[in-house]
Image (tube, rainbow, N blue to C red):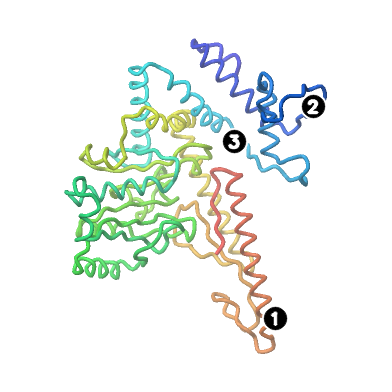
Amino acid sequence: MDASLEKIADPTLAEMGKNLKEAMKMLEDSQRRTEEENGKKLVSGDIPGPLQGSGQDMVSILQLVQNLMHGDEDEEPQSPRIQNIGEQGHMALLGHSLGAYISTLDKEKLRKLTTRILSDTTLWLCRIFRYENGCAYFHEEEREGLAKICRLAIHSRYEDFVVDGFNVLYNKKPVIYLSAAARPGLGQYLCNQDVAFLEKLIKDDVERGRLPLLLVANAGTTAVGHTDKIGRLKELCEQYGIWLHVEGVNLATLALGYVSSSVLAATKCDSMTMTPGPWLGLPAVPAVTLYKHDDPALTLVAGLTSNKPADKLRALPLWLSLQYLGLDGIVERIKHACQLSHRLQESLKKVNYIKILVEDELSSPVVVFRFFQELPGSDPVLKAVPAPNMTPSAVSRERHSCDALNRWVRSAAACLSFRVPGHPCLTCW
């Protein structure tokens, strides 16, 4: 690493890379010696300890960070859960430090560099995930992209919204349709996956003077592993002028050679939100919302585009990481996750009291299963029901045990998914 850093002409950049390497080495080392507190000068109690004197050296500050990450010494020992992020993770973290350094450049150089980073990353993602001629919005919070897309849809359908604001919504209220498989926290106005019934609801809304605005479809939610009939939903959206937005972990399979038709239909949607960080095992990289729209003025007012260099620099960690992995590395990680999911699913089928809930999703990195205790006289597909010789209290205890076990497995699976980036996301029902 040091030899390669010597080839970098910019001394500040080389020093920053060296410091980051040393910092990561310190934080990942579990054996740290605590500093002796003896001999410290007595200073005023009004100033917090870390700020007293002439400041702390880097080793002391990193030591403090590590202690905070692993817990205080007075607490009971806990097994550390700091995952090994690997070289590709270091590259993503370097992007944040590098972004701070780049922001000190003069305006013209900064503008050219940030524009190049943004355009490169957008082009690469659109090509890898088959979303031709798309634009990209990079955001820290996963739901932020959908919020901006909603604003864009409102501006596109309500011509007077810029002038009159929300007053124009009173006469013709906008309607947002969400699948029943939507992840928690989005809120739901309508929730049914029956496309025919959804069409009936849309017609009812039109007759009541409402404006069908946005439909959020799912391609492999981690909650239920379901992929909506995106192709049919796209036809419905085109018929009624509805914006179609797709999200879900199965969108990662668009990078593979073979893609199921249900997921491939997502390439025709108006927008999609992707999370390359969890997919590729990259820490601290932004989520990405790809979209297609012809009016740059509306995308600007909706907040999807920005002239601020800081906003464009959000793509820098991903820009570095994609180059480090290359197309082969990206495809291999996604393919590996799908293969592990398939092996896990086949193994779970052989386990008593485990039921696979979603088996019709091909090449999916999601496995959804449920534990159930098959009591005498019960239907194994449904909940356990009382047997003639079992008291209600015994059945209640059995159900409580099953629920407790499901919660524990779900918690353990969540930890596994976090600690092993790129591996399947497991959800217990």
**176 or 414: which is nearer to us?**
176
Check the image and name the residue furthest to the right: 38
Figure quadrant of residue 399? bottom right
* Label 2 packing within 10 angstroms: few (<14), some (14-19), many (20+): few
Give residue 260's mark: none
Mark 3 lies on a secondary structure that is: loop
Residue 169 x/y as whole percent: 23, 57
Q: Position of residue 341 (x, y in %)?
A: 54, 53
Q: CA distance from mark 1 to mark 3?
A: 47 Å
How far apart marks 2 and 1 lie (CA) works out to 59 Å
Query: Which residue position is annotated with label 2?
Result: 37
The residue carrying mark 3 is 85
The image quadrant that residue 167 belongs to is bottom left
Q: Amino acid at mark 2?
A: Glu
Q: Residue furthest left?
A: 159
Query: Which label lies toward us, 2 or 1?
Result: 2
